């Protein structure tokens, strides 16, 4: 049987993407939605004030905010995102995510 490249998403009924992960106080939660070596798709839920300090990925990363607001910091700038906003960060660029109120986001990294 071939390996599934998509996981943790229903193939039977549609559901709200943000509802797949439940926020918890004082935590950053993540859920992998893909297994592909070329494309990594993760769903994140951040509690109030939580953040991920500087990180970088080999491929370009797309951040799509589902709920709430956050800040993505990179190269000395801070971009504020609200629900519905999308931002791409090029590969090999150090960046940090979070620090405002609770939010959920979809992260898609495309490896070259």
Image (cartoon, rainbow, N blue to C red):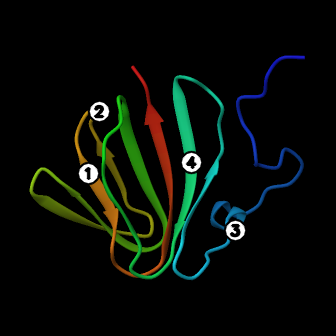
Position of the N terminus, as image quadrant, is: top right
- Mark 3, Cα crowd under 10 Å, few <14 / some 14-19 / many 20+, is few
Under circle 3, the secondary element is: helix
Nearer to us of marks 2 and 3 is 2
Few, some or many residues within 10 Å of mark 1 (<14, 14–19, 20+): many
Measured as percent of width and height from the top left, residue 59 is found at 36, 30
Report the side of 2 relative to 88 (left or right): right
Distance between the Cα atoms at labels 4 and 3? 14 Å
List the residue tagged with mark 4.
Answer: 42
Q: Earlier in the sequence, mark 2 or mark 3?
A: 3
Is residue 32 positioned above or below 15 on the image?
above
- Disc 1 target residue: 95
Looking at the image, tell me whether mark 4 or mark 3 is earlier in sequence order: 3
Which residue lies under the disc numbered 2?
A: 91
Question: In whole angstroms, how far apart are the C-alphas of marks 1 and 3?
Answer: 26 Å
Where residue 34 sits, quadrant-wise, is top right
Relative side of 93 to 18, left or right: left
Dots 1, 2 in contact, CB < 8 A: no
Of labels 4 and 1, earlier in sequence is 4
**In this rendering, position of residue 71 left or right of residue 48:** left
| Element on which disc 4 rests | strand
Residue receiving disc 3? 19
| Mark 4 and mark 1: Cα distance apart in space | 17 Å
Report, in whole angstroms, how far the alpha carbon at label 2 lies from the one at label 3: 29 Å
- Label 2 to label 4: alpha-carbon separation: 17 Å
**What residue is drawn where x is 76% and y is 61%?**
15
Q: Examine the image and state in which quarter residue 82 appears.
A: bottom left
Name the residue: 54% across, 60% down: 44
Mark 1 to mark 2 CA distance (whole Å) = 10 Å
Q: Residues within 10 Å of mark 4 (few under 14, many from 20)?
A: some
């Amino acid at each position: 049987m071939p390996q599934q490249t998509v996981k943790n998403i229903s193939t039977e009924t549609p559901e709200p993407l943000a509802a797949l992960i439940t926020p918890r106080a004082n935590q950053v939660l993540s859920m992998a939605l893909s297994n592909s070596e070329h494309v990594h798709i993760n769903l994140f839920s951040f509690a109030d004030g939580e953040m991920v300090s500087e990180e970088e990925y080999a491929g370009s990363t797309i951040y799509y905010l589902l709920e709430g607001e956050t800040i993505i910091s990179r190269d000395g700038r801070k971009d504020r995102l609200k629900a519905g906003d999308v931002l791409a960060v090029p590969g090999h660029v150090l960046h940090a995510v979070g620090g405002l109120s609770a939010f959920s986001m979809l992260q898609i990294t495309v490896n070259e």
